[in-house]
Image (cartoon, helix red, strand yellow):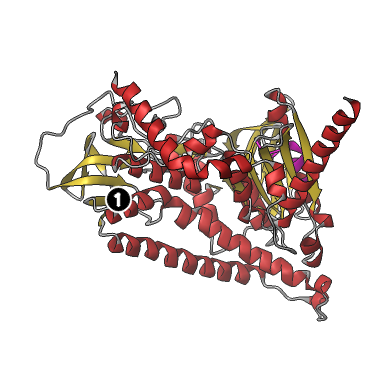
């Protein structure tokens, strides 16, 4: 019997025994046996590591080594610090290296500071529109100092970031993880040089993250960054001294629309240059169309679709082509928000295999081609999201510890996507168009916030939920736009991954009145449609 067949047999036996008690609950929630099995620990599978062995040794450093560790983590972003915490608490001798920000891009110049700023701008809008809540005051003559408010909002943001960043360092200390601040230079596949000392890891986790796609290959862009005419999201979130009167944003993805609303709500005239014929590619078209209308009517943001940027002329005009014609647009600042690229510099030189976009190639346990070396988070180019990096970290560390054996499969794992606009957008699973392309037999169930009690009471009635439900009742996709939808989309991720059908979801008590009650309403509506079809079939049989 091969190691692979032995491992498969061991895993199957262990999972079956540990899952026996929960089979009935799986069945009652319409879960398939395979989804039940995949969620069960496989600690009995002691030979898991032999099933897909690393194929290469990578470059070996032959010089003097200052210290050796069970695990070295390079990068302290969400995935990196979680991996270090887990390893340290499990008793592994662990080192984590950070070159700049404890907490990484997300905590310092990405997810957290943008959400802090957006919350401040939302508070300002609540003041401006306080009359609709019955507040009687001289609201028509409000004297809002937008420039000073902008500065104060950044001061608040800085305090939020400092608190969380300090928390990461404290967490490392509490987990007995050794920390080093400096650039980690790979001198071998499992050896790094930091501050003049070389360290070796039995295992290494690459959590080096990503950086902005600066498009410096376009004429005039490099000079534009030097002068400050062009900026990335890093500069845009730290632009704390002066609020620009106008801004052009190249890119209508998540970063672009979040910054567009942030600046527009403070009075900046914003124009988005979008190469595609719609905003937010990959998000359900019905949701995007409604959001685009809100951007135009409420936020006064202009969008130029089908436009491809070609150069920055005289450090002033952004030149783009549309419908075969060359056009020009200018603004006080231009934000380039065209996505991010993996930060994998120096890894190929020590034997780490990279993909077409310079991402580190990994398997379902986040292993690279080099023995003992894992990669997690943005550097793998698998859904550049902090919550994906968290799951990567859990998967990799559990594999190092030889526990559970639960793989991460990006092709099948439902990943919630959250966009912190006003109203918020959240999705998980398939869109309606994707379900059609896959040839699935499904129904669509919708419910609008305009008819939800909590939404009406809170004056938050824009948006809807949209469920993609197979004819057997299982949910395969969900798209939401509305108040706080990012806070409860996880319920639908659970439903999709664990194959909880709308029958089971309808029988789960959802508190009333709440925003997330809209999930129950949509599930109940879907069940009503399916029930009507069944009764009709019964009647005609």
Which secondary structure, mark 1?
A: helix
CA neighbours of label 1 inside 10 A, class few (<14), some (14 to 19), many (20+): many
Residue 16 visible from this viewpoint: yes
Return the residue nearer the eye: 428 or 418. Answer: 428
Image quadrant occupied by the C terminus: top right
Residue 448 picture location, percent across and down = 81, 51
Return the residue found at the far left. 64
Q: Residue at x 39, y 46 (%)?
A: 394
Residue 302 picture location, percent across and down = 75, 46
Q: Is 480 one of the magenta-colored residues? A: no
Query: What is the quadrant of residue 288 in the picture?
Result: top right
Residue 493 picture location, percent across and down = 60, 44
Return the residue nearer the eye: 58 or 333. Answer: 58
The correct choice, above or below, for 415 with respect to 156 in the image is above
Return the residue nearer the eye: 339 or 351. Answer: 351
Return the residue found at the far bottom. 137
Q: Is residue 143 left or right of residue 8?
A: right
Q: Is residue 525 left or right of residue 87?
A: right
Q: Is residue 361 left or right of residue 352?
A: right
Q: Which residue is mark 1?
A: 87
In the image, the segment drawn in magenta is 278-290
């Amino acid at each position: 019997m091969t190691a692979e067949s032995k491992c498969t047999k061991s895993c199957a036996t262990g999972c079956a025994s540990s899952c026996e008690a929960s089979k009935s609950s799986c069945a009652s929630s319409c879960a398939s046996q395979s989804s039940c099995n995949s969620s069960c620990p496989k600690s009995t599978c002691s030979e898991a590591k032999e099933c897909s062995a690393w194929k290469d040794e990578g470059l070996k450093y032959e010089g003097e080594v200052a210290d050796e560790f069970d695990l070295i983590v390079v990068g302290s972003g969400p995935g990196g610090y979680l991996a270090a915490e887990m390893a340290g608490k499990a008793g592994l001798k662990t080192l984590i290296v950070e070159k700049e920000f404890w907490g990484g891009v997300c905590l310092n110049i990405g997810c957290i500071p943008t959400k802090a700023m957006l919350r401040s701008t939302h508070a300002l809008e609540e003041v401006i529109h306080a009359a609709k809540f019955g507040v009687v005051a001289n609201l028509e003559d409000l004297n809002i100092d937008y420039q000073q408010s902008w500065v104060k909002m950044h001061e608040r943001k800085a305090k939020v970031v400092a608190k969380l960043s300090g928390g990461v360092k404290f967490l490392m200390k509490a987990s007995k993880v050794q920390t080093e601040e400096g650039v980690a230079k790979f001198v071998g596949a499992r050896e790094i040089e930091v501050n003049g000392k070389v360290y070796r890891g039995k295992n290494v986790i690459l959590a080096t993250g990503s950086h902005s796609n600066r498009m410096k290959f376009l004429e005039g862009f490099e000079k534009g960054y030097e002068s400050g005419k062009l900026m990335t999201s890093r500069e845009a979130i730290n632009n704390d001294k002066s609020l620009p009167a106008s801004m052009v944003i190249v890119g209508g993805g998540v970063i672009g629309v979040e910054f567009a609303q942030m600046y527009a709500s403070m009075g900046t005239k914003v124009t988005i240059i979008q190469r595609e014929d719609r905003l937010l590619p990959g998000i359900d078209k019905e949701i995007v169309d409604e959001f685009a209308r809100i951007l135009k009517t409420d936020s006064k943001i202009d969008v130029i679709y089908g436009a491809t940027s070609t150069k920055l002329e005289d450090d002033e005009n952004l030149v783009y082509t549309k419908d075969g014609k060359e056009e020009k647009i200018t603004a006080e600042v231009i934000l380039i928000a065209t996505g991010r690229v993996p930060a994998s510099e120096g890894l190929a030189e020590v034997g780490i295999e990279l993909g077409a976009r310079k991402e580190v190639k990994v398997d379902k346990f986040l292993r690279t081609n080099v023995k003992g070396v894992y990669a997690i988070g943005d550097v793998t180019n698998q859904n550049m999201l902090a919550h994906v990096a968290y799951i990567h970290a859990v998967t990799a560390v559990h594999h190092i510890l030889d526990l559970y054996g639960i793989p991460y499969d990006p092709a099948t794992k439902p990943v919630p996507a959250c966009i912190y606009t006003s109203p918020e957008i959240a999705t998980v699973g398939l869109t309606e168009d994707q379900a059609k392309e896959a040839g699935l037999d499904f129904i669509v169930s919708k419910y609008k916030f305009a008819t939800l009690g909590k939404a009406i009471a809170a004056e938050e009635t824009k948006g809807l939920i949209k469920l993609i439900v197979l004819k057997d009742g299982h949910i395969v996709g969900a798209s939401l736009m509305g108040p706080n939808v990012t806070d409860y989309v996880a319920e639908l991720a659970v439903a999709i991954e664990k194959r909880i059908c709308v029958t089971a979801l309808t029988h789960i008590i959802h508190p009333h009145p709440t925003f997330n009650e809209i999930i129950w309403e949509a599930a109940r509506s879907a069940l009503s449609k399916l029930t009507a079809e069944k009764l009709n079939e019964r009647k005609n049989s």
